[in-house]
Image (cartoon, rainbow, N blue to C red):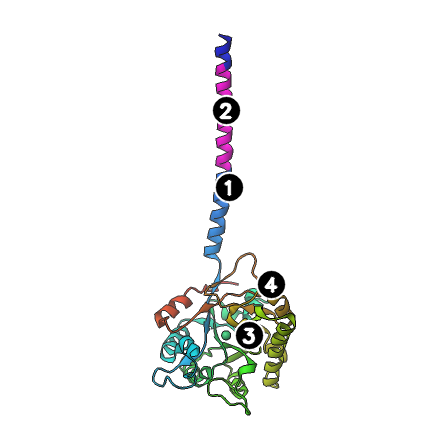
Amino acid sequence: MLFKLERQKSKRQRFSRKKIGDFQFFSLYSIVFFFTLLITLSYINAPRIPILGFHGIVDLNNSNLGIAQNPIAQRMAYPMQNLEEFLEDLAANNYWFLSTQEMYDYFINCSQDIPEKYVGKKPIMLSFDDSYKTVYTNLIPILERLEKEFNQKIKVVLFVNPGTLSKVNHPSTTYLSCEDLRTGFKKGFYDIQSHGQSHKNLVTLTVQDLNQELAQAQTHLRECMAGLAPEQEIAAHIAYPYGSMNHQVETYASKYYQSGYLYNSTILRFRWLNDKYRISRLTVNRNKTTARLIQMASRSFSIIQR
Ligand SMILES: [Zn+2]
């Protein structure tokens, strides 16, 4: 009889221990689930800004101009006719074409309030890497036409390698000249920023070469643009060549530049912590149709209120 009672008691204890165990497991599971859901929702709903990364612009009716000798450039170049259609759609649909400094002041560093005139607009950034001549010859006429038609200036960001620019003693039909940069800037279309001095992969360099590549690009671009703008507006931000960077590159880039851009096929999302030296960009090549670009742009969030 005593033995039976003992057995029942221990059975009850086992049962209640199991209940407590189940309860603890359920609580832990609920907490983990809740936080996972919260993180997922905040990720999905985080404000987004598409930053599109183009290279050269090829005219389908005159495709040999400027970039013919370079197969990589050919592959990366985007058709001018598609780009024109895309820009026309943006001009007609209330976009705000961000400069690198606007991106930094209003969204990355958040040091300034967004001016009233931008409320309700959709922010986007259009960037062009590698200093191709066609960003002048094929793009400027489109921007001028759209400005007349829509009474809106579309500003583009150029990430330039001053080391490859066309020079008087070393002329080139492939690359922009300093004079092209100055003209596009005076017309109000270009934001001139750095892509390193000579497009070297920054993670492979010694500290000395890394410093030189970062510093020279800034100095030379500022010399090229002298007299047109306050020095700090030019080459204040960098896009790493090949999108390649690491902790060391970030450390040295921060000595010269306020922010750094990747090339990682990812849309820029604003979460709790944003690294201003790892700003995501969406890659664009000729396989992406105009419709696809419009779809990429439409993922921008609208600034409804301050
Ligand atoms: Zn590049």
On the image, the x and y values in percent for residue 190 come to: 51, 80
Foreground residue among 278 and 207: 207
| Above or below, 150 relative to 43 | below
**Contact flag, marks 2 and 1 (Cβ < 8 Å):** no
Q: Earlier in the sequence, mark 2 or mark 1?
A: 2
Task: First in sequence, mark 4 or 3: give its number.
Answer: 3
Q: Which residues are magenta?
A: 7-27
**Was residue 14 drawn as part of the magenta stretch in this picture?**
yes
Residue 121, can we see it? Answer: no
Q: Amino acid at mark 1?
A: Ile
Pointer 3 local density, CA inside 10 Å: few below 14, some 14–19, many at least 20: some
Q: Where does label 2 land, which residue? A: 16
- Magenta-colored stretch includes residue 26: yes
Residue type at the position of mark 2: Ser
Marks 2/3 in contact by CB < 8 Å: the verdict is: no
Packing grade of label 1 (10 A; few <14, some 14-19, many >=20) is few
Residue mark closest to the camera, 2 vs 1: 2
Disc 4 target residue: 247
Foreground disc of the pair 3, 1: 3
Q: Mark 4, mark 3: which one is toward the viewer?
A: 3
Q: Amino acid at mark 4?
A: His
Q: In the rendered structure, are the residues bearing label 3 and label 1 in contact, judged by CB atoms less than 8 Å apart?
A: no
Rendered image: mark on residue 200:
3
